[in-house]
Each structure stands twice: as structure tokens, then as C-alpha cells.
Image: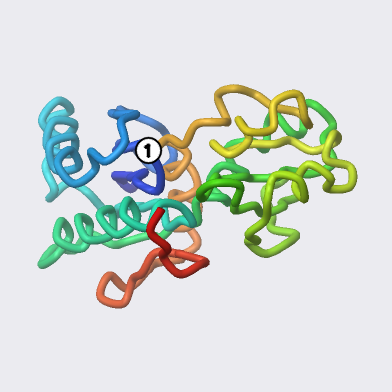
Amino acid sequence: MALQLAYETSGSTCGVSLHDDDNLIAEYSLYIKNIHDSALAELTNHLLHTIGKSADDIDFVSISAGPGSFTGLRIGYSFLKGFIFHTKIQLVSVPTLHSVAYAATEFAQSTDALSILSIVHSHKDVFYEQNFNIFAQPIGDVKLTNQETLSSTPEIHSMVLCGPGALHFQNIGKQLSGLNRLTPRFIGKLGALYFANDTITDPISAEPLYVQAFTPH
């Protein structure tokens, strides 16, 4: 048994969840932009207090690694590096697009989908996307694309579209509303698998997956 705290800060969601391995125990999320810096510590303390746990009980933390909001990712990583400093807590970096695809596997298999397409909106008409098979194994790299190009993807109507960017492609592909909002439980589910496979991140050198250079907008 390994006790895990999982964090989502890569977009407008600011959330933390507690897991026993990959079993969800509790989750707090705020769907408010630009609140990460002031809310992460409070959400963490409130969750641990409610469950009757402390940082000493935590074996590892998982963090949404991006791609996504430059500011949100930076705040998430900075908070966790401070949180686990001088502790035995291990860090697991979970690629955001992979976490959504992993959460979508059951839906993809039940609908006979061809594959899973995870999408995160970047800015304006720009999206991050990555293709996975129905078992959430990557079959392509993370790409930056636009709405027109993505909409014309061959066989897109046979794919599961998931992630918050999928909301921009209504009535295209196979979609389930619960898979179109980022949540820390997605990070925790895949984080448990990463941890079981010893995919641990060095907190000193850990950096988010930005994909592109930050451009103010």
C-alpha cells in the first residue's frame, strides 16, 4: 500500500486528491482561473486534516506535468518541491495528456473506438494533442496544432476525444463529458502506475513539460 497525493494545476483546475495506491479516497478541486498560488497549500492542508493524515503519512506525490498553462505548471511544481523538501516523499511527474487518455480507456474499449485523442487548449486557435491506442499507450508525440487541422484528422469520428480541449470539438468523435475536464483523480490513477513501475522524478531537476516557449497572451 502506498499513500499518494495527486495534483492538477496545468489549466483552470486547481485540485488535489488522496489515493491509496490508485484507489481514490478524497478529492478537492476548484475550477477557478488564477487561484493556484493561493489555494494549493490550503486545499492540501484541509484534505489531510479531514482524513486525519499528515505529510509524514504520504509515500509519494504525483503532479500534472503538462503541457498546459505555463503559470499553472510552474506554481504546481514549485509548491510540491517545497512541500516534499527534507522529507522522504517521492515525486512522480505525470504527462497531462497521457493521464486523460488513461482515464478514457474503459470508455474507448466499450465504444469500439479506433484510438484515443487527448486534447488541451493552449491559446487562441492553438491546441496540444497526442494520440494513444485504446489501452492508453502513446502512438504519437505531443503536437501543437490548430482547430481546422485537428478537425480534419483522418478517422477522427472513430476516435475518443478527451481532455478540456475536446470541448472545442463538439459533435466530433466519441466523447464523454466526464473526460473533458481535468481533475487530480486522473493524475493519481496514472501516477500510481508510474510509481509501481519505479518511474520516479528527481525533485531537484524536475521541470514541467512546456512543449513550447511561453508567449504572453
Q: Which residue is mark 1?
A: 12
Residue drawn at the location 34% of the way across and 55% of the way down: 73
Return the x and y of residue 62 as percentages of the image width and height: 36, 52
User: In the figure, is residue 170 to the left or right of 182?
Assistant: right
Q: From where the camera sits, is residue 29 visible?
A: no
Q: Quadrant location of residue 202? A: bottom left
Tell me the quadrant of the picture where the N terminus can be found: top left
Q: Secondary structure at mark 1?
A: loop
User: In the figure, is residue 149 to the left or right of 3?
Assistant: right
Residue 204 position (above or below residue 215): below
Q: Quadrant location of residue 145? A: bottom right
Q: Quadrant location of residue 65? A: bottom left
Residue drawn at the location 67% of the way across and 48% of the way down: 136
Q: Residue furthest right?
A: 155
Q: Nearer the viewer, residue 196 or 179?
A: 179
Binning the other alpha carbons within 10 Å of mark 1 as few (below 14), some (14 to 19) or many (20 upward) gives many
User: In the figure, is residue 211 to the left or right of 147?
Assistant: left
Q: From where the camera sits, is residue 31 visible?
A: yes
**For the residue marked with disc 1, what is the amino acid?**
Ser
Residue 209 position (above or below residue 79): below
Residue 85 position (above or below residue 117): below
Residue drawn at the location 57% of the way across and 51% of the way down: 98
Q: Nearer the viewer, residue 216 or 5?
A: 216
Residue 116 position (above or below residue 79): above
Return the x and y of residue 71 as percentages of the image width and height: 31, 55
Return the x and y of residue 199 as percentages of the image width and height: 46, 66
